Amino acid sequence: MGENRRVAVKTDLDPAIADRLKRTSDGLVAAIVREHGSGDVLMLAWMDDEALHRTLTTGRATYWSRSREEYWVKGATSGHFQYVRSVALDCDGDALLVTVDQVGAACHTGAHTCFFDELPVTSPAGGADR
């Protein structure tokens, strides 16, 4: 109960790309999104093969919503679009780096980035001047 099990969706993702992906048990790959101009890390979302295919072929960031269990194009309802500049696969094949031109806020809270709640870090002995 409570498991996210997805039915495989037919996709036209290039098999050479699909073969390199290491997916979670529910078929997803983490997509880290950063802003082209500033380099800010904006958000983390999830893609399956079809979401990645749509992103690569439309130039619009498309993700799989785990809560709604459907595809969503960033900005389709909010107007805060992400126009894709590049997509890179990490060395292990288990994460994507999506570089975008962000229009409006990236976070559903209305913040520019989802990473605004900084946690305290205790510096190791020897100081932080490393």
Image (cartoon, helix red, strand yellow):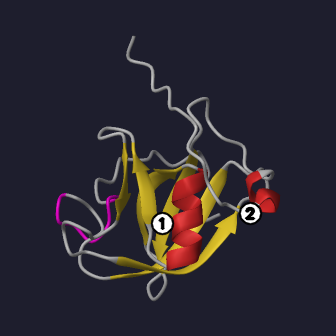
Q: Earlier in the sequence, mark 1 or mark 2?
A: 2
Secondary structure mostly seen in magenta is loop
Q: Residue at x 61, y 35 (%)?
A: 24
Q: Residue at x 52, y 66 (%)?
A: 54
Q: Which residue is mark 2?
A: 14
* Residue 105 on image: x %, y %: 24, 72
* Residue 93 on image: x %, y %: 74, 52
Q: SS of the residue at dot 2?
A: loop
Query: Mark 1: which amino acid?
Result: Val
- Viewer-side label of 1, 2: 2
Any part of residue 128 in sight: no
Asked if residue 3 lies left or right of residue 109, the reply is right
Q: Which residue is mark 1?
A: 33
Residue 35, above or below 70 = below
Quadrant occupied by the N terminus:
top left
Residue 127, above or below 121 = below
Near-viewer residue (5 or 42):
5
Near-viewer residue (30 or 41):
30
Mark 1 neighbour density, 10 Å: few (under 14) some (14–19) many (20 or more): many
Asked if residue 18 lies left or right of residue 128, the reply is right
Query: Mark 2: which amino acid?
Result: Asp
Q: Is 15 part of what is drawn in magenta?
A: no
* Residue 9 on image: x %, y %: 55, 44
Q: SS of the residue at dot 1?
A: strand
Quadrant occupied by the C terminus:
bottom right
* The magenta segment: 109-115
Q: Quadrant of residue 122?
A: top left
